[in-house]
Image: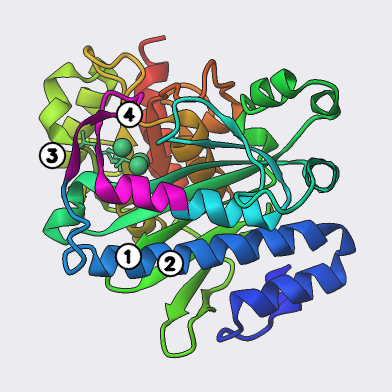
Amino acid sequence: TITDICPQTGVTLSRYMMELERWNPELSEVESIFTSIQVAAKAISNLVRKSTLQANTGYYKGSMNIQGEEQSKMDVIANDVLKNALNWAGHFKTIASEEEDEPISSSDPQGIFPEAIIDSGKSYIAVFDPLDGSANLDSGIPVGTIFGIFRHGTECQLDRQLCLEDVLQPGRNLVAAGYCLYSSATTLVMTLGDGTHGFTLDETIGEFVLTHPSIQIPQQGSIYSFNEGNRWEWDQPIQDYIMDIQTGMGKQQNKYKARYVGSMVADVHRTLMYGGIFGYPADRTSLNGKLRLLYEAAPMAFLLEQAGGRASTGTRPIMDVLPTDVHARVPVILGSPDDVKELESYYEAVI
Ligand code: AHG
Ligand code: MN
Ligand code: MN
Ligand code: MN
């Protein structure tokens, strides 16, 4: 585990990846994948901090993404930065993004490497939300990037079309996942399936430094994080659960505090650090909630489970849900295991 490899905090992510590869040669590709991800994260962090100074705020008028959301300038810029970085990693055959209508077969942007080399070394799929919470950016509220890494199946070697369908994998198949939070600090939290670990960007050396080895979420918390503007549209079990934790009438018998940033990465990171429960449930208008399964819910669910937490739709583990399409949405309830289990018991009571 990470403590075997990097016993002390302060080790850089680059060194952690090199040590990991030394102990697990089969992870050599993961090392170069994370090199490209952390370069993109540093670049996006820089662009986010300077977006106001560089007139990169605001929206492309009328440019709707497939989600029906108006794209912010920084949505598009962050998407380009990540696509470029991942293409140059040379290990991705397919990438899917919130800001791309369809999955795209990645090829090197400058057309330098012949397709053959590209194809031989590429057996991974990257799914990502390049800028999460982007509607908050222009007001200085924290935003983030979310990513997940899958392996391609072998059938994809035969037919490019199969590669694109190969993107639709459940979270259980994730090889790696992570997010980068652009806030008071820039923090990259990742998992390879062997614990969830946090690295904080030290801008004086331009390196992510291990600050949170083997994160363990508190068993139970006292913070709930839901957009209560949707309250009267939520499923009844959610309404009953929230009422109980606000009045102290639930099993936990204590009143919870409300905290809601409106950027999933910020709300999930606080939940991971302090415990409690975050939710974007189904409601009468959005029957599957708002958050996208492939590149928001599933990577976050992987990180939470690896940190001893729980991530559910309210009735089943998010990591077991198979995406029906790239931008499929899913109800999200995640956080401390006792809190998520208590909320699930309100659904069990009505099923
Ligand atoms: P994105 O900016 O990538 O489209 O994601 C926004 C999401 C997520 O960050 C957050 O949890 C949720 O939208 C907030 O939605 P509401 O504003 O409806 O609460
Ligand atoms: Mn968006
Ligand atoms: Mn998002
Ligand atoms: Mn986004």
Q: Secondary structure at mark 4?
A: loop
Q: Is residue 248 visible?
A: no
Q: Are marks 2 and 4 in contact (CB under 8 Å)?
A: no
Mark identifier at residue 43: 2
Mark identifier at residue 247: 3
Q: Are marks 1 and 3 in contact (CB under 8 Å)?
A: no
Q: Secondary structure at mark 3?
A: helix
Could you tell me how far apart the alpha carbons at marks 1 and 4 are, in whole angstroms?
21 Å
> Which percent across, then down, holds residue 167?
63, 28
Say above or below: 317 vs 300: above
At x 50% / y 62%, what residue is drawn?
Answer: 40
**Which kind of residue does numbered mark 3 sit on?**
Thr
Please provide the residue range marked out in magenta. Answer: 59-80
At x 36% / y 55%, what residue is drawn?
Answer: 144
Q: In the image, 256: left or right of 113? A: left
**Which kind of residue does numbered mark 2 sit on?**
Ala
Say above or below: 105 vs 13: above
Q: Which residue is mark 4?
A: 65
Mark 3 vs ligand 1: CB below 8 Å: no
How many circles with numbers are drawn on the protein? 4
Q: Which residue is mark 1?
A: 47
Disc on the earlier residue, 3 or 2: 2
How was this image coloured? rainbow
Can you name the residue that lies furthest to the bottom here? Answer: 204
> Which percent across, then down, holds residue 243?
16, 31
At x 81% / y 68%, what residue is drawn?
Answer: 21
Could you tell me how far apart the alpha carbons at marks 1 and 2 are, in whole angstroms?
6 Å
